[in-house]
Image (cartoon, rainbow, N blue to C red):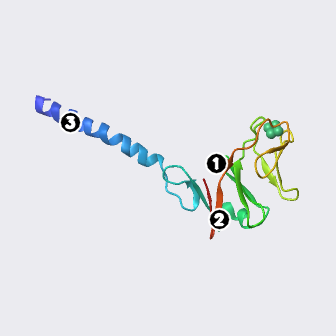
Amino acid sequence: MNRRDLIQRIALGGAVLVLMPSIVESCSKSSTGDNGKLTPGGSAIDLDITLPAYSALATAGGYVVVQNIIVINVDNSKFVALSSVCTHQGCTVGFDAPSGDIKCPCHGSVYATSGSVITGPAPSALRAYTAAKSGNIISVS
Ligand code: FES
């Protein structure tokens, strides 16, 4: 390898290093729209209720858990999104439509749809997110 080849290889390696962060960044962001993945920037989740995975949200009392967030169709006009991770020991909570409460199957904690604790042992409320429905899309942010 002569000096010229060496300089060309170093220049090529530098170009790869310069481009690498943008390549990695573009791979880490996903477009979504309706598949439940994060939108660019990771600020929202859009759920298309016509898709089988989210069709439970088309009915009052239905809910899904996506990316550690429980999204609930409370009564067809009110949609709620909360952390699905129980603040006691981390079990996944579920929505109990008959009572209208969120319950943890592990030790019996009960939460309101606001996320506040009704019955312990959970020590604190579930984190609340914003959920809004537009057409067949429920956006959580
Ligand atoms: S983990 Fe939910 S009540 Fe214990």
Q: Give the residue displayed 73% in from the left and 44% down from the top.
A: 126
Tell me residue 75's x, y (percent): 78, 65
Q: Nearer the viewer, residue 64 or 141?
A: 141
Q: Which mark is residue 57?
A: none
Q: Ligand 1: which quarter?
A: top right
Which residue is the site of mark 2?
A: 133
Amino acid type of the residue that numbered disc 2 sits on in the rendered structure: Lys
In the rendering, at what x and y percent does residue 31 appear?
Answer: 49, 56
Mark in front: 2 vs 1: 2
Q: Are marks 2 and 1 in contact (CB under 8 Å)?
A: no
Q: Secondary structure at mark 3?
A: helix
* Quadrant in which residue 34 is drawn: bottom right
Q: Does the closest atom of ligand 1 sit within 8 Å of the Cβ of label 1?
A: no
Say which label, 2 or 1, has the lower sequence index: 1
| Label 3, residues with CA under 10 Å away: few <14, some 14-19, many ≥20 | few
Name the side, left or right, on which 65 lies relative to 45.
right
Residue ID for mark 3: 11
Disc 1 is placed on an element classified as loop
Quadrant housing residue 61: bottom right
Q: Nearer the viewer, residue 90 or 10?
A: 90
Name the side, left or right, on which 114 lies relative to 66: right
* Circle 1 residue: 67
114 left or right, relative to 133: right
Q: Earlier in the sequence, mark 3 or mark 1?
A: 3
